[in-house]
Amino acid sequence: MSRLNFGTVDRCSVKFNTATLLGLQAAYENFSTTGQDSRNFEICITDESAARGAPMDEHDVISVTFVARMPPGVRGLGNASPLGTSIKYVVSPETGEILGIYLTK
């Protein structure tokens, strides 16, 4: 079992804390305003401090990234999917507030 800023990851399950769930909701609501079809995306939740190997402190953040899928048989670099544009939301693990929104590659 691993404890991260957004909750606990076990072999077969993930437990989210309330702030993470609020952040996911806020990110999805903002993403839905872009008019992109959410069925063409995968959602990646990352504990940024754990990803960087940094110790936990008050500046830790969670990222929620909507990653555009590539159609079968199509290749592309970075954010070159014809199905949509990938978007990364930076979320506070304490409040679930969106701290930043970025287009990704």
Image (cartoon, rainbow, N blue to C red):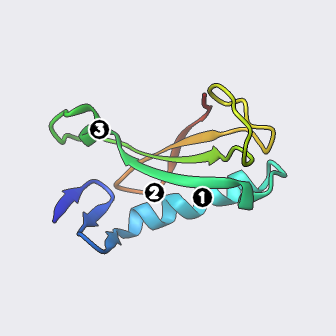
Q: Amino acid at mark 2?
A: Gly
For the point 73% across and 59% down, the residue is 38
Q: Nearer the viewer, residue 64 or 85?
A: 85
| Neighbourhood count class around disc 1 (C-alpha, 10 Å): few under 14, some 14–19, many 20 upward | some
Residue 104 falls in which quadrant of the image?
top right
Tag 1–tag 2 contact (CB < 8 Å):
yes
Tag of residue 96: 2
Mark 2 → mark 3, Cα distance in angstroms = 19 Å
Where is residue 58 shown, x and y percent of the image? 24, 41
Q: Is 5 above or below relative to 59?
A: below
Q: Is residue 29 left or right of residue 4?
A: right
For the point 61% across and 45% down, the residue is 67
Mark 1 → mark 2, Cα distance in angstroms = 8 Å
User: Mark 1 or mark 2: which comes first in sequence?
Assistant: 1
| Neighbourhood count class around disc 3 (C-alpha, 10 Å): few under 14, some 14–19, many 20 upward | few
Tag of residue 26: 1
Mark toward the viewer: 2 or 3: 3
Q: Is residue 40 left or right of residue 91?
A: right
Where is residue 83 shown, x and y percent of the image? 79, 45
Mark toward the viewer: 3 or 1: 3
User: Mark 2 or mark 3: which comes first in sequence?
Assistant: 3
How many dots with numbers? 3
| Neighbourhood count class around disc 2 (C-alpha, 10 Å): few under 14, some 14–19, many 20 upward | many
Tag 2–tag 3 contact (CB < 8 Å):
no
